[in-house]
Amino acid sequence: MMEIRPILGVIGGSGLYEIPGLKDVQPVEVETPFGRPSAPITVGWLANQPVAFLARHGLGHFIAPAEVNYRANLYALKSLGVTRVVGISACGSLREDFAPGDIVIPDQLFDFTRQRKSTFFEDGIVAHVNVAGPYCPALSYQLFQAVKATGVRVHRGGAYIAIQGPRFSTRAESNVYRAWGMDVIGMTNAPEAFLAREAELCYAVMAHVTDYDVWHVSEQPVTVEMVLHILEQNTAVAYQAVRYLVRDLKDERSCDCTNALANAIITRPEAMPAETRQKLALLISKYVK
């Protein structure tokens, strides 16, 4: 663990590979029991607070959504002492009133991905974590207020459906997701949100609406160019919102994220393999002696 504990971890998505304005920047290489994170973690000072930044898709965007080592990313941030994480990601809108250029702070998540490593708990230790509310409500509210302060149009709440990718949806799929009541669509919140909860990290998402997916017949189907254009427009907003958020964050946390594993670990200590206990010590040591 670093001598200076970052008050916030930021995971940048498509088009977001650094935080401008970070001072005294220090790149940190972190090894985890789950492999290496997507990129070196950049630690620096923002609004007089220490912040850690990680590029989800690697520097230069060479890691596809299904190939991201989400476990290593979250474990690495946890190992640096991070307790709160904000994920920044692009998303498509599945409703008319969430327009391109808007920002959504989702409060629900539907995992429609396949065969992604979505838990730290395996190899002899089982935990069933509660993710009824997959995003931290306290951090999500603070993030909403920070984004609102930038003046951009922001929506509080909404259901994010995470698809496998890397392809975009067919029109039939997009219409089904709308019929299911989903509000925005992306490729990265799952399993990121679930792993954050297992690591007892507060997790919230700043989802940038870049397009109307493909359901909106009066709009052009989504393209990479379209996504990057909106993200470029919103980059300054994202960083200003992070600055506002960091400025107002306090060390104390009062949400349930802080003890998410308290009643989740079902394996008896005497049945836990020593190697797995060591591997998960960062996560379980306060519950398993």
Image (spheres, helix red, strand yellow):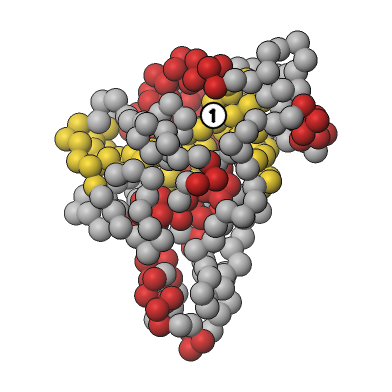
Is residue 252 something one can see in this rendering? Answer: no
Residue situated in front as seen by the camera: 71 or 241:
71
Residue 209: quadrant of the picture? top right
Left of 122 or right of it: where is 246? left
Q: Residue 272's x, y, as percent?
A: 48, 82
Q: Residue at x 46, y 59 (%)?
A: 199
Residue situated in front as seen by the camera: 270 or 30:
30
Q: Which residue is mark 1?
A: 90
Left of 84 or right of it: where is 20? left
Q: Measured along the vertical axis of the image, is residue 68 above or below residue 72?
A: above
Instruction: Pick out the residue farthest to the top.
Output: 218
Q: Residue at x 35, y 60 (%)?
A: 32
Q: Measured along the vertical axis of the image, is residue 190 above or below residue 21?
A: below
Q: Measured along the vertical axis of the image, is residue 174 above or below residue 42?
A: above
Which quadrant does the C terminus fall into?
bottom left
Q: Tell me the element at label 1.
A: strand
* Total tally of numbered discs in the picture: 1
Instruction: Pick out the residue farthest to the bottom.
Output: 270
Is residue 112 something one can see in this rendering? Answer: yes
